[in-house]
Image (spheres, helix red, strand yellow):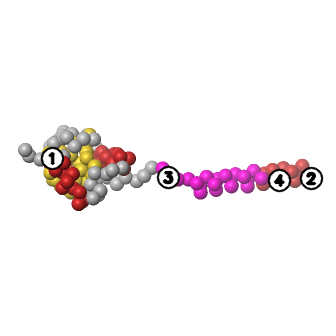
Amino acid sequence: MRAQLILLAMIAFALASAALSLGDAFSRYTHRTTNSVGIPDAGTGRLRAAVPKGERLGFFSDRSDSEAADRRMRAAVYSLAPLLVENTPKRPFVIGDFQNEAGIPVSLSGHRLRAVADLGNGFWLLAAAQR
């Protein structure tokens, strides 16, 4: 009888310990990947209609946080696959990521670009300005 009581106590302790560990794991879990919103389908359609087939695109962001700019570039690349996107504003066509629409004219003139189309979600299709 005493052995059965000890065995029952050990099982109860193991179950309680496992339940507490599991509960602790769930309460401390943090989803580490951020959601990146890419270019909407309507925007990709406008882009594909305006950009010559096979053209490599550049990318430019006005974000001061380089990690945020990288996430936005990856979201654009994913949205536009299989088109190739390079992290440079020195291409005939460039995807612009603008956090603040008021700063768009300054950013465009600084990189000698002009706006072609609003792609949505802060993304713009830009083209090299004519000289």
> Is residue 20 part of the magenta span, yes or no?
yes
Answer with the quarter of the image where residue 57 lies. top left
Residue at 23 percent across and 60 percent down: it is: 102
Q: CA distance from mark 4 to mark 3?
A: 36 Å
Left or right? Give the position of 30 relative to 65.
Answer: right
Closer mark to the observer between disc 2 and disc 1: 1
Question: How packed is label 2: few (under 14 Cα within 10 Å), some, or many (20 or more)?
Answer: few
Circle 4 residue? 9
Residue, far left:
131
Circle 2 residue? 1
Residue 103, numbered label: none
Q: Is residue 42 visible?
A: no
Closer mark to the observer between disc 2 and disc 3: 3
Q: Reading the chain from its start, which is encountered first: label 2 or label 4? A: 2
Q: CA distance from mark 2 to mark 1?
A: 88 Å
Q: Reading the chain from its start, which is encountered first: label 2 or label 1? A: 2
| Element marked by disc 1 | loop
